[in-house]
Image (spheres, helix red, strand yellow):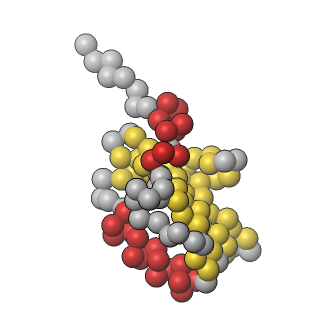
């Protein structure tokens, strides 16, 4: 198992890939409390042609996560929290305008 993360120096992420189930689990446990908030929502999305998750806060994208699965086991975890790499998602995932009158 390996995890690749991209925080762009703006949010917590690993500088290099992390290999091994135990090391990946330890990294994810350290990152999750500081990088995951109770007000985040996630939903299934196609990310670079793969099934993944879009993580949002108040309808605005804050991250994406993709898992590579083989033989019913997670092989690779890829996540991007780098806000500079999420700008293209903003124009596709803006909340619908409030049409109340």
Residue found at x 48% / y 56%: 8
The outermost residue toward the right is 71
Q: x and y percent of residue 98 in the render?
A: 32, 22
The residue sitting at 61% across, 80% down in the picture is: 19
**Location of residue 17 by image quarter:** bottom right
Q: Is residue 12 visible?
A: yes
Asked if residue 92 is positioned above or below residue 46 in the image, the reply reads above
Quarter placement of the C terminus: top left
Rendered view: 10 above or below 12 = above
Give the residue drawn at x 46%, y 82%: 26
Residue 43: tell me if it is visible.
no
Rendered location of residue 99, percent (x, y)? 33, 18
Farthest residue to the top: give it: 101
Q: Nearer the viewer, residue 8 or 33?
A: 8
List the single residue furthest toward the left. Answer: 101
Q: On the picture, is 25 further left or further right than 99?
A: right
Tell me which residue sits at (48%, 45%) in the image: 84
Image spot of residue 82 (x, y percent): 47, 52
Nearer to me, 5 or 33: 5
Quarter-wise, where is residue 59 in the image? top left
For the N terminus, the image quarter is bottom right
Query: Looking at the image, how many numbered discs can be counted on the residues?
Result: 0
Residue 69 in percent (x, y) is at 68, 68
């Amino acid at each position: 198992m390996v995890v690749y993360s991209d925080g762009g120096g703006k949010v917590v992420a690993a500088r290099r890939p992390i290999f091994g189930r135990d090391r990946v689990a330890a990294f994810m446990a350290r990152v999750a409390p500081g990088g995951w908030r109770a007000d985040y929502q996630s939903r299934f999305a196609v990310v670079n042609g793969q099934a993944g998750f879009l993580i949002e806060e108040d309808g605005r994208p804050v991250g994406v996560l993709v898992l590579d699965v083989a033989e019913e086991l997670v092989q690779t975890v890829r996540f991007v929290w780098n806000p500079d790499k999420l700008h293209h998602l903003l124009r596709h995932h803006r909340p619908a305008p409030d049409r109340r009158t």
